[in-house]
Image (cartoon, rainbow, N blue to C red):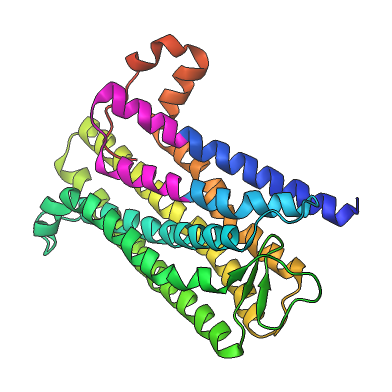
Amino acid sequence: MDLCITIKGVSFLLQTGLGILGNLLVLLAYAHIACSDGRVQPVDKILCHLAFANLLLLLTRCVPQTMTVFGLKNLLNDSGCKAVIYAYRIARALSVCITSMLSVFQSIIIAPASSRWVGLKVRVSQLLFPSFAALWLINMAVCIAAPFFSIAPRNGTVPEFTLNLGFCHVDFRDSLSYIINGVAVSGRDFIFVGLMVCSSGYILLLLHRHGKQVRQIRSPDQHSSRNAAETRAAKTVVTLVTLYVVFFGIDNIIWIYMLTVAQVPPVIADMRVFFSSCYASLSPFLMITSNKKIKNKLSCAAANPEQMSLNTEDSTRI
């Protein structure tokens, strides 16, 4: 096997394996928290939903990509390609939408009670499940065109304006469809990325102001406890946003290049898949290391499974 193919295959295999493992650990930890504690905090519901979306993304994109890199052919027929590409597009869209939702939710929660958001601050927890349902329905509708362009690979040369994913082809048939699809997907992503960046900046601004105020009105112990919780929440949310924005930037630089050529080389498509999937693979480990509830559950499971239910964290923040 060629050295480049081996390196590419091992890279995809590690990314896929670690990403699936990390997201499964997050989901299992939250399942145990829900069973043992009887209640899951709103921010944990968002993180759980994010882990599920990222797991779906890895299963529908990185798993078949890894199998293709190692030489497996004819993995899917036309119907299989349509289903997999559609599920992947939805999962990718949900990943950015839920990350944005997490950032907005956290900014509302820590906003001053006297702010104009006070009404939403009271109702925000009740809006979680309607928001989840709306995001699913909207993205299912937006991505509905994807199956119509998805086909199994054909023998011979790849037609113009076709994304060669290896295990499937996305054939846009003409330049207009190709460009419209690229602009629509990128435009949607830029809106949600802009929203998450703005809300993360607002979080940092509020924490900076709160830090100055609480030093004057709280006792040292109260200040330390409150400040530590707020700082931990801010660091996790802002780090998740930063992580997404970095890989989103790389992904879209490659995507813009792909829009300028009629026939995309497979190596370019592989690079885009790898970088666009890095967030899904790395974010669960950030959740595990920064969330005490998840960390304690997993630590207890590794050390003494019988004692897991005796070590529940009371924190309501990340």
Q: Main secondary structure of the magenta part?
A: helix
Q: Nearer the viewer, residue 173 or 259?
A: 173
Q: Residue at x 61, y 40 (%)?
A: 18
Q: Is residue 155 magenta?
A: no
Q: Nearer the viewer, residue 201 or 212?
A: 201
Q: Residue at x 57, y 83 (%)?
A: 178
Q: Residue at x 61, y 74 (%)?
A: 255
Image position of 187 with respect to 51: above or below: below
Image position of 270 with respect to 70: above or below: below
Question: Which quarter of the rendering shows the C terminus?
Answer: top left
Q: Is residue 39 magenta?
A: yes
Left or right of 125? Residue 193 is right
Image position of 134 with respect to 141: above or below: above
Q: Residue at x 44, y 50 (%)?
A: 53
Left or right of 267? Residue 293 is left
Asked if residue 295 can be seen in this view, the reply is yes
Residue 168, image x, y percentages = 66, 64
Q: Nearer the viewer, residue 175 or 118?
A: 175
Left or right of 78? Residue 108 is left
Residue 194, image x, y percentages = 39, 71
Q: Nearer the viewer, residue 162 or 41?
A: 162
Magenta span of residues: 26-53
Residue 74, image x, y percentages = 73, 56
Residue 84, image x, y percentages = 55, 57
Asked if residue 107 can be seen in this view, the reply is no
**How many badges with numbers are in the image?**
0
